[in-house]
Amino acid sequence: MLSNRLAPAGEAPPDVAVAPARPQVWHAVLAFVGVAAVLFVVMAHLSPRVPTPPMTPLNPPFVGPSWLRGWAQWDSGWYYRIASDGYSFAGRHQSTVAFFPVYPLLVRAVAVVVRNVWVAGIVVTFAAGAAAAGLLMAWLRDRMSPAAAWTALAVVFLYPYAFFLYGVVYPDAVFLVTVVAAFLLLESDHPVLAGLVGALATAARPVGVVLVVALAVRTVERRGALRPAAGRFVDWSRLRRADAGVLLSVLGFLAWCLFLWHRFGDPLAFATAEAGWQQSPGPNTWLKVRFFQDMAHIWNLRWWGVFYVSHSVLTIVAACLIPRVFRRFGVGYGVYVSVLIGLSAVSTMNFFGMARYLLAAFPCFAVLGEMLAERPALRSTALTAGGLGLVAFTAIFGTGYYMS
C-alpha cells in the first residue's frame, strides 16, 4: 500500500496493471505512410532502370517524373486510356469495358488538378491506401486487443503483394477502402449510407457484387434476426425499414450494366471482353484447365514459377482461414470472404491474380494477425519475411515483370 501512495504523479502504482493504449486511426495512417516512403524510395531507385517495351508492354508509354515510372505497369495502361478517352468495346477481344469505372473516374477527376493522368493514378491509389489503413484500424480496434489489431494491420501492410495499395495504377486500394467503409457504416447503424458507399464498391470491381449479399446478411445478423435453427432462417419482424438501405449497394453494379447496355448494346460487355484474355466464363476457366497444363511444365518457368504458384498457395491459405472468420466475426463477414475468394478463384483461368484479389479479404488478414499476436516469435519471423518479400516484389514489379 505504501508503494501505491509513493508512486510518482501521472504513473500507475507498481501493483496496478496498465491497459494498453487504444490504437488511433492516425497512427495507422502514419504507419502506412512510413512503409510507402520505403517503397517509393525503392521505386525511385529502380525506375531509371525499367526496361523499355516489349518487356513492359505499357500502352501508352509513361510520361511524367521518371522516379514514379515503376508504379505504372501492365493493366495501368488500360486505366490510363479510360481516364483519358473513355470506354470502347470490341466484342470478344481485349477492350476497356473489362475494367470497372470508379477508379478511372477518380483518376480523371484528380488529373484535372495535377495535369498528368499517370501521376493522378498514383495519387488516387496512395490516398485510397492511406484511407483504407485508417478505416481498417477503426474496424480492427473494436474487435480485438491492441496488440492483435496492430499485428493484423502489419500483416496487411507487409503482405508481399500489398504494393498494389501504395501507388500502383490499379483499383485495389479504392475497392478495399469502399468495402471497409461500407462495413464500418453498417456497424455504426447507418445502413443507407453503407449501401451508398457499397454502390461505389460494386462499381469498382466485378467481384464487388458479393458486398451486396454480405451487407444484407450482416444486417440481419446484427438485428438478431438470423435464426436458422428456429424453423425459419430470418425473423423479419426484427428488421427495421431503414435496414433495406444496404441493398442500395447493388446500384453501382446496375448503373454500370445500364451504361454498357445503352452505349454498346451488351449489359455484360465486361464479361464478354474477358474472352480477349482467355478468361471468359466456361468449363475451361472454372476447372482451371490452363493451370494444370502450366503445372505440367512449371519447371520451364524457372524462378518466375515461384510467383505463378504463389497465387494458388495463397488462395488455399486464405480459404483455410474462412472457418475462423465465421467463428470470430460472424456469418456476415464469413459469407463475404467465402464468396469473395470463391468467386475470384472461379473466374480466373489459372489462379493468377488471386494474390492481389485477396487484398480485399480483410477479415482473413484480421484473424491471421490475431493468431500471430498470440505467438510473438512466429509473429516476428512472419512480419520480417513479409516485409522483405514486399520490398522484393515491389522491385520486381517496378522493373516490368508481370506479378498479378
Image: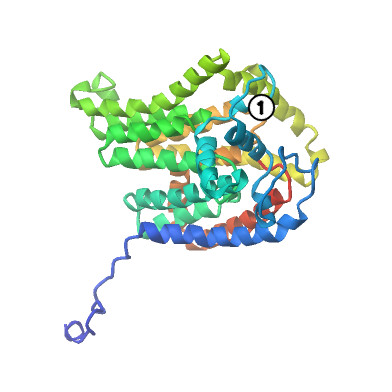
Q: Residue furthest right?
A: 300
Asked whether residue 287 appears in the rendered view, the answer is no
Secondary structure of the residue carrying tag 1 is loop
Foreground pick, 386 / 132: 132
- Picture coordinates of residue 195 (x, y %)? 34, 31
* Residue 84 position in % (x across, y down): 60, 35
Does residue 352 appear left or right of residue 331 in this picture? right
Q: Nearer the viewer, residue 269 or 223?
A: 269
Q: Residue at x 72, y 42 (%)?
A: 61
Looking at the image, residue 317 lies above or below residue 27: above
- Estimate the x, y position of residue 278 in percent, counting from the top left: 70, 23
Residue placed under numbered mark 1 in the picture = 349
Q: Identify whether 10 is placed above or below 298.
A: below
Q: Is residue 271 left or right of residue 17?
A: right
| Residue at x-position 63% and y-position 17% | 282
Q: Name the image quarter holding residue 327.
A: top left
**Residue at image location 33% in from the left, 49% down from the top:** 143
Relative placement, left or right, of 363 versus 42 is: left
Q: Amino acid at mark 1?
A: Met
- Residue 58 position by quadrant: top right
Q: Tell which of 138 and 50 is nearer to you.
A: 50
Say if 139 sits above or below 80 in the image.
below
Q: In which quadrant will I find the C terminus?
A: top right
Q: From this viewpoint, which residue is outermost toward the top? A: 265
